[in-house]
């Protein structure tokens, strides 16, 4: 009751104030060359009245009472201007903004953006920008994102990793770059994600079923990568990034130059990384009870390099935009020589230990070329987007020829492939998405679209795991968003997908002794399958002042992949003979997601739980059988489907202890259980254990000669994983401490951004349950100092 | 402040819920290949002979139920060694195979078996047609599964020679 009275009296006061004589403050915002600046923000205080300048740079603020005001004018790419104005009649205040060489990236993606994105998405979403990536930079993009609650990785050595969202990975997570689904060899445990983390400026992680917008595979979630930056008009700017790491002696640089003149912009970036064998806090490792001594703690032959380039250019007009992104990611990295993959092997230690920077057998070499054309145009209330993409993923795994099973002891010189080519995958992908969004009114938006993808996959080499195949998918969707108010949003969507997959027959290149003589075994059949699915999603988000509440329910799906349908070969990484199942149905997942967030000036707390059910999860089941002929005496693993139930969630809490000191905790947990099939009662493979990060972050605007200085301590606690499924090993709990610090330094007119990290400060020896090398007891990286220096620069284009 | 303490309470509850775990009776143990005991044959570094049969003797066990096993013999003329044994054997010189011997066979284990004593005769032929097999360093590889799909491998270094 008292509150209402207060409110009432306040409104009376407000009325009284409004009744006073008021004036207009107006003016024009230009740059130093008198060029009009549309879109500049002008705020007067007290009163905090703000407007944005119009197309001619003019602005007008009504209802200003007599008095002295402070005027703040800001515009991206220009130095903010603050001045005071005495208002006693209608007044004019013009100003010229000064162009500043600043790093745009910070401005485009701010926390505010993240907040907005969270409110308009009924699924749980994490948004990070390149500052986050710089401050938390790991060996690869996914390793850097691992700090986010609900995100984990499957790591292959120090430079490659695969995304895992809430325990689901491989083909159950979609990675999208600039609107086009990234297609590599997602199915392989030792195949990392081919994305250059230095070229990324904004990443959104959608946790939950997102087939509605992204089609097949988006069962676990989506990593949506964007390169949104647009250089300021008539400017040229860029950045030189230098990075060094002590653990694997990595040295790298990434250089970016971008410019824009009127409606045309272009950007060029090149990244070079070169690293040596990484070090673990161990003198030896036990591979299947076979002890391998390590030379100076180095994991033999895990060195590698990356060479990437990106070119983007395009047209930016108020009602039409067309952008091209052309990139090539190229890497070569060694596999741990004593276990290729996990099979213990003696190696020529003298050869390998001579240098810790050389890449010898066995190694992998990957080349990913991508062209994306993104178009946007607006016509009345409707906007259209058309995203077109072409990708080629070329991957080779090379090792000394080893005769496995019935392969000839000596490699015949009559083969079409080289003796050292163990596997080759060559993938061509064509993608197209068309979308139309109609803003019916301020409250309701409809989006309709179709998307399609065609894949051509070829194979080569002496080992056979998956056949060559062609894959085609076509989907259409409709999404409606309705806001009842600024705070409450309802979203509903429906999608239909159709897909086909055709695998090609494959015969061994060597003969095997069969019952009646010997023959070239046929490993894969000509297979032609088609799938269709209806997916849907419905969600509601409500955001009263300090709260954000969300609920979403959705159905997602995934087409079986070629490996699941038609694998038929020995994976010597696991002593497993992997057999596809041509009768698999499309995997379906139902998920209920919730989210509750509270944030006040000092406290932010959030919890995002989920419940998930698969009626037919596709799973590579290790059976109790062995196979002589096709499996060379190895254990038979067959793809099967079972009911799976999962639950889990993330929580985070941040509290501002002092003005400059923040304490935070983030945790994640997933529980999975198979409800039917041969592994009833067991979990799913690669289930991440519960984990939490306790963080202390100290920020100061100015510290010594640093600006925006920060220091942060991460205490990471990971529980033991005792809930396992064959052929996994249980993994002990561990704790590690990471440090981070950095800031900006100004040397004359030049800004430098510095960030230093110390990962695994105490050089703790621990195992990561979801590491590719876990099965052979390889500990994780030891202490690692990571230094990143970025030097932004800019200039003008006349 | 009231809201904040409620939230903290909720947080604590959530953490407690996260910390829960459960127990059930699913098989969580690998089968065991027992290499100890004098009756086991072959042992690491033992010698077999072409044109003769040897008796493969080993003991398998599992906490619930055994599955199947396989044995494989292939040459180790390049010393690629995936021996799982600690004992190092004396190897012959590295050489290129001409007509190396390969043996792979899989065997079932009767259903419901927890302990299984293998005692079987395995014949090693003299050669392929008229060409004798290469003698020298070989690997003797044993793989064992249980019903749940857990597996255990043993790799032995042996020699197969012509008598």
Image (spheres, rainbow, N blue to C red):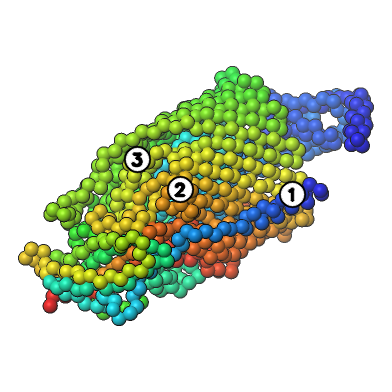
Residue at the image position 16 percent from the left and 75 percent from the top: B49
Residue at the image position 58 percent from the left and 61 percent from the top: A719
Badge 1: few (under 14), some or many (20 or more) residues near its Cα, within 10 Å? Answer: some
C-alpha gap between disc 1 and disc 2: 38 Å
Indicate left or right for A112 with B100 as reference. Answer: right
Location of the C terminus of chain A (image quadrant): top right
Q: Which residue is mark 3?
A: A583
The vertical placement of A143 against A737, above or below, is: above
N-term-proximal mark, 3 vs 2: 3
What number of labels is visible? Answer: 3
x then y, percent, for residue A195: 47, 47
Q: Which mark is residue A68?
A: none
The vertical placement of A181 against A445, above or below, is: below
**What is the secondary structure assignment of the residue under circle 2?**
loop
Residue farthest to the bottom, as pictured: B38
Displayed quadrant of residue A42 = top right
Q: Are marks 1 and 3 on the same chain?
A: no
Q: Which mark is residue B7?
A: 1
x then y, percent, for residue A43: 78, 34
């Amino acid at each position: 009751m008292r509150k209402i009275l207060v409110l009432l009296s306040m409104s009376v006061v407000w009325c009284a104030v409004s009744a006073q004589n008021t004036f207009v403050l107006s003016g024009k915002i230009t740059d130093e060359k008198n060029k009009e600046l549309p879109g500049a923000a002008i705020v007067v205080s007290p009163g905090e009245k703000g407007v944005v300048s119009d197309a001619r740079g003019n602005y007008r603020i009504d209802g200003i009472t007599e008095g002295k005001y402070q005027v703040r004018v800001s515009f991206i790419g220009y130095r903010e201007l603050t001045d005071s104005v005495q208002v006693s009649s209608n007044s004019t205040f013009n100003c010229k903004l000064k162009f500043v060489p600043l790093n745009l990236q910070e401005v485009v993606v701010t926390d505010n953006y993240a907040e907005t994105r969270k409110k308009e998405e009924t699924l749980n979403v994490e948004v990070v920008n390149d500052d986050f990536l710089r401050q938390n930079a790991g060996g690869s993009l996914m390793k850097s994102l691992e700090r986010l609650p609900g995100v984990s990785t499957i790591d292959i050595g120090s430079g490659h990793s695969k995304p895992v969202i809430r325990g689901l990975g491989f083909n159950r997570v979609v990675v999208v770059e600039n609107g086009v689904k990234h297609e590599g060899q997602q199915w392989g445990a030792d195949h990392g994600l081919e994305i250059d983390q230095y070229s990324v400026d904004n990443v959104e992680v959608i946790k939950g079923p997102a087939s509605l917008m992204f089609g097949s595979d988006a069962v676990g979630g989506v990593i949506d990568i964007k390169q949104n930056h647009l250089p300021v008009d008539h400017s040229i700017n860029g950045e030189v990034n230098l990075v060094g790491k002590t653990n694997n002696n990595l040295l790298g640089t990434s250089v970016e130059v971008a410019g824009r003149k009127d409606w045309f912009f272009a950007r060029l970036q090149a990244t070079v990384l070169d690293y040596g064998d990484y070090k673990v806090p161990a003198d030896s490792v036990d591979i299947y009870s076979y002890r391998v001594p390590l030379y100076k703690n180095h994991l033999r032959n895990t060195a590698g390099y990356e060479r990437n380039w990106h070119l983007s250019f395009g047209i930016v007009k108020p009602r039409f935009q067309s952008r091209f992104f052309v990139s090539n990611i190229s890497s070569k990295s060694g596999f741990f020589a004593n276990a290729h993959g996990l099979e213990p092997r003696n190696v020529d230690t003298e050869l390998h230990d001579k240098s810790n920077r050389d890449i010898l057998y066995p190694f992998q070499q990957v080349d990913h070329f991508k062209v994306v054309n993104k178009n946007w145009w607006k016509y009345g209330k409707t906007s259209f987007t058309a995203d077109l993409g072409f990708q080629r993923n070329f991957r080779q795994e090379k090792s000394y020829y080893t005769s496995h099973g019935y392969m000839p002891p000596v490699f015949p010189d009559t083969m079409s492939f080289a003796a050292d080519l163990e596997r080759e995958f060559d993938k061509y992908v064509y993608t197209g998405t068309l979308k139309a969004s109609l803003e019916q009114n301020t409250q309701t938006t409809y989006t309709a679209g179709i998307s399609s993808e065609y894949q051509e996959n070829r194979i080569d080499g002496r080992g056979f795991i998956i056949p060559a195949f062609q894959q085609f998918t076509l989907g259409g969707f409709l999404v409606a968003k309705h806001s009842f108010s600024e705070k409450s949003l309802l979203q509903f969507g429906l999608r239909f997908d159709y897909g086909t997959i055709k695998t090609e027959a494959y015969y061994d290149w060597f003969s095997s002794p069969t019952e009646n003589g010997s023959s070239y075994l046929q490993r894969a059949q000509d297979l032609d399958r088609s799938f269709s699915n209806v997916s849907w999603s419905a969600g509601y988000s409500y955001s009263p002042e300090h709260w954000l509440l969300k609920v979403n329910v959705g159905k997602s799906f995934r087409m079986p992949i070629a490996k699941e349908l038609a694998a038929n070969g020995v994976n010597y990484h696991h002593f497993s003979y992997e057999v596809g199942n041509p009768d698999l149905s499309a995997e379906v997942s139902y998920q209920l997601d919730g989210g509750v967030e509270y944030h006040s000036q000092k406290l932010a707390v959030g919890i995002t739980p989920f419940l998930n059910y698969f009626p037919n999860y596709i799973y590579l089941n290790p059976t109790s059988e062995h196979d002589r002929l096709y499996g060379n005496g190895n254990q038979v693993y067959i793809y099967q489907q079972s009911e799976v139930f999962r639950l889990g969630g993330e929580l985070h809490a941040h509290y501002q202890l002092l003005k400059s000191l923040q304490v935070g905790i983030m945790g994640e947990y997933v529980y999975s259980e198979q409800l039917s099939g041969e592994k009833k009662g067991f979990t799913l493979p690669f289930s991440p254990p519960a984990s939490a990060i306790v963080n202390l972050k100290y920020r100061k605007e100015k510290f010594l000669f640093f600006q925006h200085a920060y220091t942060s301590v991460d205490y990471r606690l990971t529980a033991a994983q005792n809930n396992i499924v064959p052929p996994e090993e249980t993994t002990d709990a561990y704790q590690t401490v990471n440090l981070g610090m950095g800031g900006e330094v100004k040397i004359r007119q030049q800004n430098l951004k510095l960030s230093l990290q110390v990962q695994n400060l105490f050089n703790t020896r621990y195992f990561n349950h979801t590491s590719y090398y876990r099965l052979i007891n390889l500990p994780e990286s030891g202490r690692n100092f990571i230094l990143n220096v970025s030097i932004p620069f800019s200039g003008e284009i006349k | 402040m009231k809201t904040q303490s409620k939230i903290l309470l909720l947080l604590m509850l959530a953490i407690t819920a996260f910390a829960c775990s459960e127990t059930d009776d699913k098989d969580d143990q690998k089968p065991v290949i027992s290499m100890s005991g004098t009756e086991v044959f072959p042992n690491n570094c033992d010698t077999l002979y072409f044109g003769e049969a040897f008796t493969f003797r080993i003991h398998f066990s599992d906490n619930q139920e055994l599955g199947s096993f396989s044995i494989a013999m292939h040459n180790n003329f390049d010393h690629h060694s995936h021996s799982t044994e600690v004992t190092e054997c004396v190897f012959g010189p590295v050489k290129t195979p001409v007509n190396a011997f390969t043996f792979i066979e899989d065997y079932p284990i009767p259903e419901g078996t927890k302990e299984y004593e293998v005692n079987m005769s395995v014949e090693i032929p003299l050669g392929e047609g008229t060409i004798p097999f290469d003698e020298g360093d070989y690997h003797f590889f044993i793989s064992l599964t249980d019903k749940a799909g857990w597996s255990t491998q043993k790799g032995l270094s042996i020699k197969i020679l012509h008598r």
